[in-house]
Amino acid sequence: MPKTTMGRIWKGENLPDSAALFPLSDILQVSPRWLLYGGNARSFVDAPDIDWVTLPVHDLARITGSDRGAAIDAMPIRRGWIDRKLRDTDDLWLAEMPNDLLGDIAGEGDILVCKDIEPRESELIDGSVYIVMLNEQPIIRRITFEAHAILLSTSSGRLPPIRVPRAEPPALDGSIRPVARVLGALTLTAL
């Protein structure tokens, strides 16, 4: 289901079509009647074992070196999913994947679950994916440590890796600055 369609359903502007009604009610653990009419039907907000966290959605193009800018939207995510998959709910935010350069992580248009980090090399985890400011432009790359460099790469192979020399003591070059670690991705699929 396209993200915009889900947003309109969530805001009450549209109703789910018949093909999406039952799968959506299963995913949200609510009755189809509640999805269509609301009211006294079992509410997913009140359903047992369900707790929702609303995460801000940010536009990657608006990120600057020190600021994500104002959220452009918000998206509810089940706390249980976050706890099971990510084990952390602090400082999380969402952004749309702008391309498919890291297809093993997310495709273009998928929703990235991001966590703020301090821009220090000691905060980085070898092999993890980060949003990095490169010459004041946000890029998404996998970080790998080499003996004398930090390698920023994609999984698509369409772009050559970026090598950033490591300093002694370990410090990041001023031209790159990690902003957030990408913890996971959500794919909205049309039903």
Image: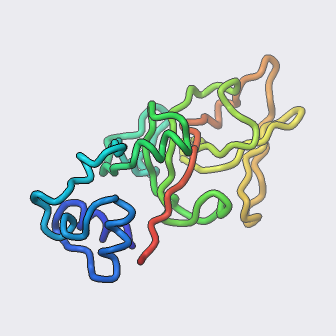
Q: What residue is shown at x 30% (from left), y 71% (from top)?
A: 5
Classify 161 as above or below 143. Answer: below
Q: Quadrant of residue 155?
A: bottom right
Q: Nearer the viewer, residue 158 or 105?
A: 105
Q: Looking at the picture, how far across and down is residue 62, in whole percent?
A: 41, 47
The number of discs equals 0
Q: Looking at the picture, how far across and down is residue 85, in whole percent?
A: 56, 45
Q: What residue is shown at x 41% (from left), y 42% (from top)?
A: 79
**Quadrant, the C terminus:** bottom left
Q: Quadrant of residue 14?
A: bottom left
Classify 125 as above or below 26. Answer: above
Q: Is residue 116 left or right of residue 6?
A: right
Q: Is residue 145 left or right of residue 12?
A: right
Looking at the picture, the colour scheme in use is: rainbow
Q: Is residue 173 left or right of residue 163?
A: left
**Quadrant, the N terminus:** bottom left
Q: Looking at the picture, how far across and down is residue 64, in whole percent?
A: 46, 39
Q: Is residue 114 left or right of residue 36?
A: right
Q: What residue is shown at x 82% (from left), y 19% (from top)?
A: 168
Q: Nearer the viewer, residue 28 or 10?
A: 28
In this view, the residue farthest toward the left is 39
In this view, the residue farthest toward the right is 147
Q: Looking at the picture, how far across and down is residue 162, in whole percent?
A: 75, 48
Q: Quadrant of residue 63?
A: top left
In this view, the residue farthest toward the top is 169
Q: What residue is shown at x 45% (from left), y 51% (from top)?
A: 95
